[in-house]
Image: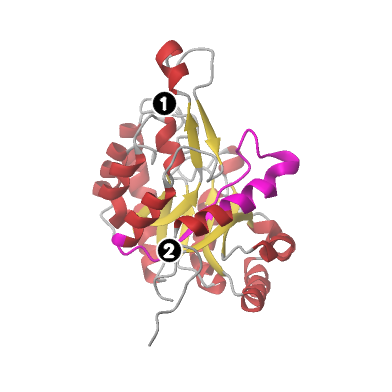
Amino acid sequence: MEDYLRIGTLVGGGDAVSVIPQIVKHGFESFSLTFWQTTGATNLAETAARVRELAAEHHFVISAIGVFGNPLTGTGDNADTLASWERLIDHAHLFGTDIVNGFTGRLTDCSIDESIPKFAEVFGELSRRAADKGVKIAFENCSMGGNWQTGDWNIAHNPTAWEKMFNAVPADNLGLEWEPCHQMVALIDPIPQLRKWTDKIFHVHGKDATIAWDIVKEYGIHGPKEYVWHRTPGFGDTNWTDVISILRQAGYKGTIDIEGWHDPVYRDELEMTGQVHALNYLKTCRGGSFVPNPR
């Protein structure tokens, strides 16, 4: 069972205690708990205790906890983001996880190169805090609408940026929360990238994309027509059997947690229909349920 790659989903950290009992019956094997910009008024110790009780009852794991905001600016709605990173690092063990995830942050409307020194300052300290507690930090590879020259939220959306980040903070406990979707949006082939970066992938989001190559060829990527859509796994272009095989060949021991709420078709009243389809699809791509060998 040590090589059993669990398939789960994302749940809001503040809603976990009420939502998980409603959906765990569908067969989710792990949950990644997320907060937007701040952990807010959530009592992390109390939430962890109640979630661990549910985990023991239903045999799932908490794969990661995270906060998604801009810890480099500390202004406006991001004023508590850095402190939330610190809280989650300090409380991760109570949830039974050793991964805290989120965005790197970014100096607003500045280039990635200009943001690297502030990243090194903030995450140099956070990586030491995390290492002291046996925690790994995983950055999601989402651009949040930014590019190399300008943007907000995150710099960890391009492999050249990853090289700069990990050179600036050469800590073994800094890595990636990777998914093929965000790379496909940038017209990057995720498979060769995955092979190259497996050593730095600590957590995987189950999110896919559909690229309309006919639109790309006729209108380009800056025209009036959409050329790519975020998709729930099983409805997009990614070969998840290849993704899982590459991860396993590299010794990946983590989970794949579905990031829903983006699919243009399986949304609203069809959200959980799409997620449960993705759950069963990804289980099939990993080879189904674990079957012990004869002795």
Q: Is residue 84 left or right of residue 113?
A: right
Q: Which residue appears at 48% of the width and 24% of the height?
A: 212
Q: Identify the image quadrant of residue 154.
A: top left
Judged from this view, the residue extending furthest toward the bottom is: 295
Mark 2: amino acid: Gly
Q: Identify the image quadrant of residue 132.
A: bottom left
Judged from this view, the residue extending furthest toward the front is: 294
Q: Is residue 133 left or right of residue 65?
A: left
Q: Which residue appears at 53% of the width and 12% of the height?
A: 224
**Which quarter of the rendering shows the N terminus?**
bottom left
Residue nearest the observer in this picture, 85 or 93: 93
Determine crowd level at label 2: few under 14, some 14-19, many 20+ residues with C-alpha closer than 10 A.
many
From the image, state whether disc 1 or disc 2 is nearer to you: 2
Count of numbered badges drawn on the protein: 2
Residue 218 visible to the viewer: yes
Q: How far apart are the alpha carbons under marks 1 and 2? A: 33 Å
On screen, 20 above or below 144? Answer: below
Image spot of residue 32 (x, y percent): 56, 59
**Which quarter of the rendering shows the C terminus?**
bottom left
Q: Name the residue tied to disc 2.
A: 254
Image spot of residue 69 (x, y percent): 54, 44
Q: Name the residue tied to disc 1.
A: 150
Magenta-colored stretch includes residue 257:
yes
Residue at disc 1, secondary structure: loop
Determine crowd level at label 1: few under 14, some 14-19, many 20+ residues with C-alpha closer than 10 A.
some
Magenta residue span = 249-278
On screen, 170 above or below 70? Answer: below
> Coloring scheme of the render?
secondary structure
Magenta-colored stretch includes residue 77:
no
